[in-house]
Image (cartoon, grey):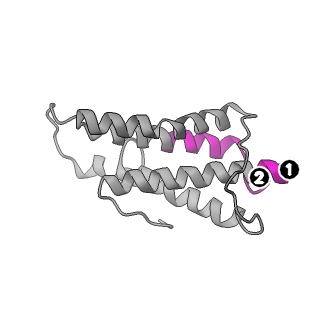
Amino acid sequence: MNRESNYRFSYAKMLSLQGNTAPYMLYAFARVQGIKKKATEGLGDLSGTEISMGTPEEAALARMLLRLPEVLEDLEVDLFPHRLCDYMFELSSQFNRFYENCPVNTAETEELKRSRTALCSGTADVIELGLGLLGIGTLDRL
């Protein structure tokens, strides 16, 4: 969907927890906030943490986070806000795959826990920024 196509509004679709919807992204944000809260206890400052790319999910999530500047530049040039929505949906989906396959709080080493927590922190920051640009406030819990 974009500003040049027709769209039939549906509350059921808009409020679904599945698919490219605000509730889906809010759920991903709430999930990452919960993980971050548990994981950051005792870890200290995560800035400068080296990110592990040991699994396909870690690498894919890191690459997705690095796409943000490109997405924002395209948004500014083309004025198609749906592209930000699409990116946010892809990021939320990639985070969910990461969450399912890469334990954060029970990571094998402290270094890996720091790396995965840093990925979670970056994901939370990007989701919060994206939702804010769309005029959607965030929730730490659903």
Q: Name which residue lies at 78% across and 68% down.
A: 42
x then y, percent, for residue 79: 23, 38
Q: Is residue 58 visible?
A: yes
Q: Is residue 17 left or right of residue 83?
A: right
| Span shown in magenta | 92-113
x then y, percent, for residue 18: 42, 45
Task: Tell me the kind of residue under disc 1.
Answer: Thr
Q: 10 Å neighbourhood of mark 2: few (<14), some, or many (≥20)?
A: many
Total number of numbered discs in the rendering: 2
x then y, percent, for residue 98: 63, 42
Q: Nearer the viewer, residue 133 or 48?
A: 48
Secondary structure of the residue carrying tag 2 is helix
Return the residue at label 2: 113
Q: Main secondary structure of the magenta part?
A: helix
Mark linked to residue 61: none
Q: Name which residue lies at 46% across and 37% down.
A: 90
Q: Is residue 45 above or below residue 59?
A: below
Distance between the alpha carbons at the discs numbered 2 and 1:
6 Å
Q: Was residue 96 drawn as part of the magenta stretch in this picture?
A: yes
- Mark 2 touches mark 1? (CB < 8 Å): yes
Q: Is residue 35 above or below residue 42?
A: above
The quadrant holding residue 135 is bottom left
Q: Is residue 130 left or right of residue 101?
A: left
x then y, percent, for residue 7: 17, 38
Q: Nearer the viewer, residue 90 or 9?
A: 90
Mark linked to residue 109: 1
Q: 10 Å neighbourhood of mark 1: few (<14), some, or many (≥20)?
A: few
Q: Is residue 1 visible?
A: no
Task: Tell me the kind of residue under disc 2.
Answer: Lys
Q: Is residue 35 left or right of residue 89?
A: right
Secondary structure of the residue carrying tag 1 is loop
Q: Was residue 91 drawn as part of the magenta stretch in this picture?
A: no
